[in-house]
Image (cartoon, helix red, strand yellow):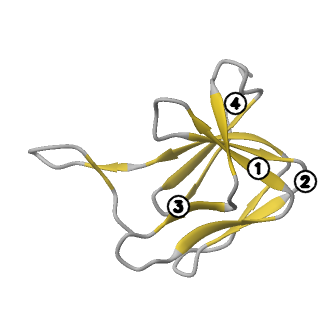
Amino acid sequence: MKNKRLAYRQGEIILEKIDNATEYILEKLNTKIIREGELTGHKHEIFGNAELWKIRHTNNMILTADEDIKIIHPEHKTLDLPKGIYRIRIQREYDEIRERLIRD
């Protein structure tokens, strides 16, 4: 079987497991919050030993987890992630006039 990509989703957050992040220019973020809802204020928050990195010139991030972690959001099922490196993307909402990020 070919390499199988693992992807996880929690609401508008998509996490794709990757082997490494060496192809990206990263800026460390000093937070455990992946995204905060613009409408509700609810947060996609990391619990466990992990770090977030912004991929320069994009809206995407890298999550490096040194152990199994949890991502918690009050309106979604808790997401259990195994140790590893993940590229995080925010799903976009289609609008005939313009593209926009989904609002939570």
Answer above or below: position of 67 versus 1: below
Is 61 placed left or right of 64 in the picture?
Answer: left
Of the 4 image quadrants, the one containing the N terminus is top right
Amino acid type, residue under disc 3 in the picture: Arg
Q: Which residue is mark 4?
A: 4
Identify whether 95 is placed above or below 85: below
Residue indicated by mark 1 = 51
Kind of element beneath mark 1: strand
Q: Secondary structure at mark 3?
A: strand
Q: CA distance from mark 1 to mark 3?
A: 14 Å
**Which sits earlier in the primary sequence, circle 2 or circle 3?**
3
Q: Callout 3: few (<14), some (14-19), or many (20+) C-alpha neighbours within 10 Å?
A: some
Quickly name the residue at label 2: 67
Q: How many neighbours does mark 1 have within 10 angstroms: few (below 14), some (14-19), or many (20 or more)?
A: some
Q: Nearer the viewer, mark 2 or mark 3?
A: 3
What is the secondary structure assignment of the residue under circle 4? loop
- The one of 94 and 44 positioned closer to us in this rendering: 44
**Quadrant in which residue 68 is drawn:** bottom right
Quick one: quadrant of the C terminus?
bottom left
Q: Are marks 4 and 3 in contact (CB under 8 Å)?
A: no
Mark nearest the camera among 4 and 1 is 1
